[in-house]
Amino acid sequence: MIDLKIVREDPELVRTSQRTRGEDPALVDALLAADAARRAAVLEADTARAEQKALGKQVGKASAEERPALLERGKELAEKVKIAHAAQTAADAELDTAHRAISNIVQAGAPAGGEDDYVVLEHVGTPPAIDNPKDHLELGEALGLIDMERGAKVSGSRFYFLTGNGAMLQLGLLQLAAQTAVRNGFTMMIPPVLVRPEVMGGTGFLGQHSAEVYHLADDDLYLVGTSEVPLAGYHMDEIIELQSGPKRYAGWSSCFRREAGSYGKDTRGIIRVHQFDKVEAFVYCTPDEADAEHKRLLGWQQEMLAAIEVPYRVIDVAGGDLGSSAARKFDCEAWIPTQDTYRELTSTSNCTTFQARRLSVRYRAENGKPAIAATLNGTLGTTRWIAAILENHQQPDGSVRVPAALVPFLGTEVLEPR
């Protein structure tokens, strides 16, 4: 959730953010109204309780003649307190609903607009000149790396097997990501992939993204689409120590997404699938450190992309394409030769205090008082990267050159057709 103090003091800032996202600025006015109603309800309840308390003192001092009237008045005040308490409870719920309806405040400088309104910040590398390139699925099947047919037989469309060197390629890629994370001060984690509703909701994935999430109704648990979710819940309801610097975690997990509404879009092969593996960086820090940490996360992602030797671009994602929890997001998109365009490989989001406020993750400020922490996340490696590796490193004879950083994990410099 956003800071309610900001909404009270600068509602136009929040309205502007809503417009940048393409969301309804009237939600800000609804939140202000709910806030005012809640404060009025609290005042009414406090006043009623104070009256009740004062009457109680009078009863203790009253004479026998005065006591019956005071006790009758006490019954009236008890009912008044009960009604006021119920009204406060209802106002609290309405305020919470209105508060959660507003996405994080978009950071100044982020572009407005939707999915196609990003700003390109940087190009790295030159797309290779490949005559009649084969796509990653054709290459993967010929090389014995990917089996979509049996994946569909076992689990349905958009499931797959990674076989032989395909499995080794993913394991090597994610191991390289894990090594990169640990070398840069991250604690490696293998988290649960089933989480409670309060954790999934706390990270912002049960609003506009709820259609993407798998829910196990009998257990009321959610399968995560990224280990960002369990890592965000790791310090839920805690006061953490940040005096020595940010807390950095890297989660290696399988991830699950329904990909609702994506039919016909990148559905061939393993670019957009229901299950994949990923190493995700996650950071807790003080709010004033968040921007610098966001740049560091982007730098570590670029270090990984340099290791797999693919051309890519960095984009500043437009407000309308941000998730509800992100204030700013940078994507790195790799060149995909057969599509003659760039496709997302990494995202890194600065979620400021939005998730931590929902999850009650705090730290001790310099004045010793608890304050809301900031959270950030970023991809360090995932299954989708295999598509970019195969297509960019394919050779005329149908083989694929293995990037030097991954050779130790596969034990070969070239993947040969079967």
Image (cartoon, rainbow, N blue to C red):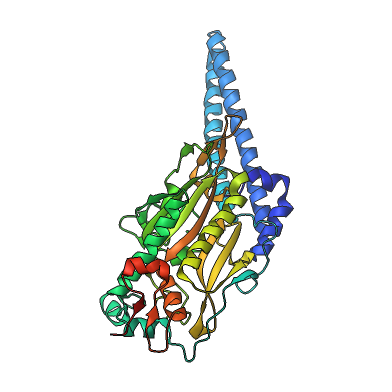
In which image quadrant can residue 294 be found? bottom right
Which quarter of the rendering shows the C terminus?
bottom left
- The residue shown at (45%, 43%) is 236
Q: Is residue 344 visible?
A: yes
> In the image, is residue 106 above or below residue 91?
below
- The residue shown at (49%, 36%) is 241
Whole-percent x, y for residue 155 in the image? 29, 74
Instruction: State the count of labels.
Output: 0
In which image quadrant can residue 66 be found? top right
Q: Looking at this view, is 336 or 232 the one in front?
A: 336
In which image quadrant can residue 385 be found? bottom left
Q: Is residue 200 visible?
A: no
Q: Looking at this view, is 154 or 171 the one in front?
A: 171
Q: Looking at this view, is 100 or 293 the one in front?
A: 293
Looking at the image, residue 28 sits to the left or right of residue 334; the answer is right
> In the image, is residue 133 above or below residue 208?
below
Whole-percent x, y for residue 344 in the image? 52, 71
Whole-percent x, y for residue 384 in the image? 43, 71
Looking at the image, residue 370 sits to the left or right of residue 417; the answer is right
Q: Looking at this view, is 36 or 253 the one in front?
A: 253
Whole-percent x, y for residue 291 in the image? 62, 51
